Image: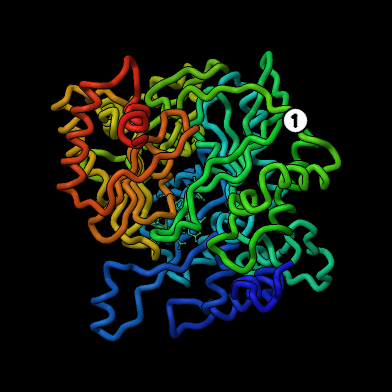
Amino acid sequence: MPDIKNLSPLEKVKVVSDGLRGTIAESLQDELTGAIREDDQALIKFHGMYQQDDRDRREERAEKKLERLFSFMIRLRLPGGFLTADQWIALHEIAGENTTGIIKITTRQTVQLHGMLKSKIKPTIKEFHLAKLDSIATCGDINRNVTCSSYPTELSVHDEISSYADKISTFLKPKTRAYYEIWLDEEKILDKKTEEDPLYLDAYLPRKFKIGIGIPPNNDADVFINDLGLIAIIENNKLLGFNFAVGGGLAATHGNPQTYARLGTVIGFVEAGEKTFKAIYEVLTTQRDFGNREDRKQARLKYTVDRMGVDKFKEEVEKRTGFPFEETKPFTFSERVDYYGWRQNPSGNWDYTLFIENGRVLDEGELKLKSALLEAAQTGKVSFRFTANQNLIITEVKPKDKKAIHKILEKFNIIEQTGNVSAIRKNSMACVALPTCPLALAESQRYLPSLITKIELLLANHDLENENIITRMTGCPNGCGRSPAAEIGFIGTALEKYNLHLGGDHEGYRLNRIYKESLGEVEILSELDGLFADFKKERKKNESFGDFTHRTKLNT
Ligand code: SRM
Ligand code: SF4
């Protein structure tokens, strides 16, 4: 255990928080400020919220000697990204009443609502609760929203695997009743023993922890970027169990070589059922006990795994589970895509995957996404599943209802938009960044769409417009839009400047690498123009852009 003197300040905040309560209740009462106390800002994350301020308005507010325009972002816990029609209607209404109204689909298959004032937090959580939705543990040093591949291979197995996302999420939820007490007025428990937490103890994990489930052959959930990736092994339509991949994570800090993106290392196979849960649990306890609690920049599981060594890490987990990992079972990911448009799933029902640029659900111009989804939900004949690429599937549409749902999508221009979007745009995504993200160094979701328009023209000039090039942007190197795992990655360094990363693959087995530093738009387009020309001339048959740049541009 580290010397208590050297612990990062947040460690103390967690330990003395009285089960994540801190002084949140008092902070909420304080009407003199739109903010909450500093320690509570850390604790409120464990309840699924972040305090933010509108960065576009900082200067203006400072000139007027006003405090920053504080508001809160809330993130829902939706393992596997599933919502019923009624839950969609509730989400739609809550977003409109209490937040900016924009429903933002995230890269981890859930949604965030921004711009919620302090006074609206409690009503929002209460309304979500009525809809059987919560935001517990979607942020903070704890297991986060569990993702799962969105597309069924064989349906009964997919349902079974999806249910793992839900069960793992419940299994790893904290024991504290703080969320229910603070936000839902549950009576305070007096016997603290009932909320003793053998997994998280009182200091929780050293850092955030992410679990994702991949179902070969589609790596749409980007399984290797998670602290723990579970790769489902299916034989004869039966789920045998999971290969475990440990130590994924994408963040780095500019100029700090001690920090780096890393893909998970597959350490072996565990059979489905009880053993899987035991192994997951002990991966977490190993990280809890061996993770770095002094330096938060070294605290993710990836650093623990590298510091201990993969073999030692695995040995420690095995010691704790009492059984060995079996030999890794063969698996192949051959793509990493969302299947846009209509697709019949193995049950005979239909799914429609909508392209939602950077996950922003709103009515804008001719494209009325929010109205369309509300009307579809109001039929009561659909469910919804978010993808890990910020898109949405209208799912489980019975053959007899398909026509009616199609008509709704047509009426609001969804069919036309999803059909007409270019290959590069369909494979693009950007993180939130400005104006709400406090860590953003550059624009991302507000900028990528216009940059893509310019890249589309370049591609057309080289007859490459049908290339599915996975392109991702983030406003800083934290990698929320998974830019380090893209064929073309733009990583913000300062306003209007981006590092250009190249060479990721299509399937998610290989990270990209930095190619050019701190480019403005003109330089980005000029670099890409040259790269596309070379790609057109020199590519091998069926070679992807990422493989081409990896082979020819980065290995010198
Ligand atoms: Fe993230 C922090 C948004 C997925 C790595 N992320 C943030 C914060 C909360 C900024 C903050 O700490 O105050 C951002 C809020 C912006 C805003 O205004 O909404 C933020 N992250 C997002 C989302 C919404 C991006 C999006 O546009 O979809 C994604 C929410 C996922 C979810 O539903 O839980 C999101 N973040 C990711 C991913 C991708 C993934 O998990 O698939 C990563 C890279 C993978 C990884 O974890 O390594 C990611 N976010 C980070 C990090 C770097 C963590 C680290 O290891 O150092 C931070 C900063 C931190 O934790 O200190 C961060
Ligand atoms: Fe903010 Fe950086 Fe994450 Fe983008 S990558 S949302 S800028 S923390």
User: Where is 287 relative to 105, above or below?
Assistant: below
Measured from the top left, where is residue 222 in percent x and y?
Answer: 50, 36
Q: Which quarter of the rendered picture does the N terminus lie within? A: bottom right
**Left or right of 359: which side holds 151?**
right
Label 1 crowd bin: few (<14), some (14–19), many (20+), radius 10 Å = some
Residue placed under numbered mark 1 in the picture: 272
Nearer to us in this view, 556 or 234: 556
Measured from the top left, where is residue 231 in percent x and y?
Answer: 62, 31
The extreme front residue here reads 556
Nearer to us in this view, 24 or 516: 516
**Left or right of 296: which side holds 556?**
left
User: Where is 453 relative to 8, above or below?
Assistant: above
User: Looking at the image, which residue is at 69% across and 28% down?
Assistant: 328
Confirm if mark 1 falls within 8 A of ligand 1. no
Nearer to us in this view, 188 or 193: 193
User: Looking at the image, which residue is at 56% across and 16% down?
Assistant: 346
Q: In this figure, which colouring scheme has been used for the structure?
A: rainbow
Measured from the top left, where is residue 84 in percent x and y?
Answer: 54, 38
Q: Which quarter of the rendered picture does the C terminus lie within? A: top left
How many numbered circles does the render carry?
A: 1
User: Looking at the image, which residue is at 26% across and 22% down?
Assistant: 466
**Left or right of 321: which side holds 548?**
left
User: Looking at the image, which residue is at 32% across and 32% down?
Assistant: 549
User: Where is 372 relative to 282, above or below?
Assistant: above
- Asked which quadrant contains residue 45, the reply is bottom right
Residue 93 visible to an observer of this rendering: no
Q: Callout 1, which amino acid?
A: Ala
Measured from the top left, where is residue 542 in percent x and y?
Answer: 34, 17
Residue 454 visible to an observer of this rendering: yes
